[in-house]
Image (cartoon, grey):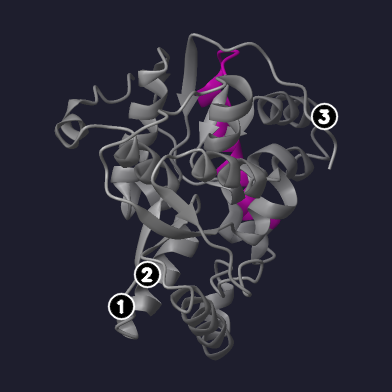
Amino acid sequence: MKERQYPAAPRDVYLFATCLVDLFVPEAGLDAVRLLEREGLVVHFPHEQSCCGQPAYSSGNPEQARDVARAQLDLFSKPWPVIVPSGSCAGMMRHHWPKLFADEPAMAEKARELGERVYELSEFLLRVLHIELPSTTDAPAEHVVLHTSCAARREMGTRVHGVELVDALPGVTRIEHERESECCGFGGTFSLKHPDISGAMVRDKVASACATGCERIVSADCGCLLNIGHAARHQDAPIEVEHLASFLWRRTQDPTARNEGKGGKA
């Protein structure tokens, strides 16, 4: 993976929340906004945004993915970073949107320019904002495992960012387990087309995490979290799941601060 050059911290950023955050885990999006606003940024949220097009693209339907991407390109017209609380969606926007428009040079250039401004949340917090986490906390100690989606690992290199952030949190012990690098079995439409294989993969993932004695699985990808969390509940496994944005916010705030976030700006 080509080493990325990082800009100075900006004043304004866009948030691309992803469809899964919007529909299933809105608190993760709100906590991402809170983290960014706490660092002094103005967060802009274009309300017309929808999906990154990854489900269609990974299912072999580039035409539909192109239509979805085309509808998003003009929503982020200012030269501001686009922050995405999902490594897989960020990878789709940064690396695959330009490919979708290979036969349309003007659109391909627009997609490439936008892709250069796309950052996964934890990457942006660390490499652009150089976030400083507190050295002490009143929060109770927690043992967690970190899950990084396959696409986030390959395309955005985000595991290193998640590890660095979690390891910097006081009172948090991150435990590695033998199936940490394996896919959780979600894979977007893979879990629908091959439910037996997907189910076996996520059962192995949950069992391996539980074997560490941890209380929580933390991830920056909602698809994986929904899959793992559902499997854990189905198995009555003694483990919780939480998006990295919410985990970071919760571990670095007073309990009364959760409702003080201002929300994004249109």
User: What kind of residue is marked 1?
Assistant: Arg
Out of 140 and 19, give the one closest to the viewer. 140
Front position among marks 1 and 3: 1
Q: Quadrant of the C terminus?
A: top left
Image side of residue 196 versus residue 101, left or right: left
User: What kind of residue is marked 2?
Assistant: Gly
Disc 1 element: helix
Mark 1 lies on residue:
233
In the picture shown, does residue 244 fall above or below 238? Answer: above
Q: CA distance from mark 3 to mark 2?
A: 42 Å
Q: CA distance from mark 2 to mark 1?
A: 6 Å
User: What kind of residue is marked 3?
Assistant: Pro
In the picture shown, does residue 59 fall above or below 253? Answer: below
- In percent of width and height, residue 217 lies at 43, 62
Indicate yes or no whether the magenta region holds residue 44: no
Contact between labelled residues 2 and 3, with CB atoms less than 8 Å apart = no
Q: Quadrant of the N terminus?
A: top right
In the picture shown, does residue 44 fall above or below 214? Answer: above
Disc 2 element: helix
Disc 3 element: helix
Q: CA distance from mark 1 to mark 3?
A: 48 Å
Question: Residue 162 got which mark?
Answer: none
- In percent of width and height, residue 63 lies at 67, 53
Front position among marks 3 and 2: 2
Instruction: Tell me which residue sits at (36%, 20%) in the image.
Output: 38
- In percent of width and height, residue 81 lies at 58, 21
- In percent of width and height, residue 126 lies at 58, 29
Q: Which residues, given as a range, are shown in magenta?
A: 62-80
Mark 2 lies on residue:
229
The answer to whether residue 47 of the structure is visible from this angle is no
Mark 3 lies on residue:
105
